[in-house]
Image (cartoon, rainbow, N blue to C red):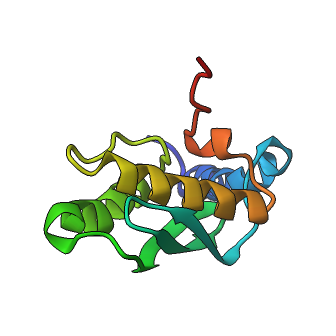
Amino acid sequence: MQKPSRIIALAALASFAYLSLPLAYADDGVAADGTYTSAAEGRNGALEVKVSIKEGLIATITVWRHHETPVITREAIEDYPRRMVEKGNIGVEAVAGATETCDAIRSAVVDCVKQAGGDPKFYGYLEPEQP
C-alpha cells in the first residue's frame, strides 16, 4: 500500500498535467477562450452560429438565426451542434436529409475556431477533398 503523501503527490501531478493540457497544445491549434459568431449559407439563406470556447474546448454551439425549413432541419439545427460539442469534434457525420444545413453549421463553426486563433484540424475537421 502506498503512503498517503505519495498518493497526494501523484494526484497533484495528475491534476497539474490535466489542467496544463490546453497550454501544452497552445501552439498546436487550440482556440482562445471566448464567444465567437459566424454565418454560412444554408439551403434557404444565411445561417448564423454562436460558438463558446472554454479552456480550449468547444463548450457550446448555438444556431441562433436561420431560414431553414423547420420540419426538415430540426434535428440538424438542434442535435448536430450538440453532437459536435459532446464528441469534441467538428467533423461529426451530417444529419441525413439535412446535409446542406449541417455543412453550413460546420462551416460557420470552423470560421469561429479560426477567429479564435485555433486550427480546425485540432478539433477533428478535415478539409473536403477537391475534385
Residue 12 figure quarter: bottom right
Image quadrant where residue 44 sits? bottom left
Q: As drawn, is 129 to the left or to the right of 95?
A: right
**Viewer-closest of 61 and 107:** 107
The front one of 92 and 95 is 95
User: Residue at (79%, 47%) from the top-left corner?
Assistant: 24
- Nearest the eye: 94 or 4: 94
Which residue is pictured at 13% across the width and 69% down the height?
71
| Image spot of residue 73 (x, y percent) | 23, 63
Residue sitting at 46 percent across and 59 percent down?
105
**Position in image of residue 54 (x %, y %):** 62, 71
Q: Is residue 62 left or right of residue 7?
A: left
Q: Is residue 3 visible?
A: yes
For the image shown, how many numbered marks are present on the structure?
0
Residue located 61% across and 50% down the image:
14
Quarter of the figure that contains the C terminus: top right
On screen, residue 85 above or below 131: below
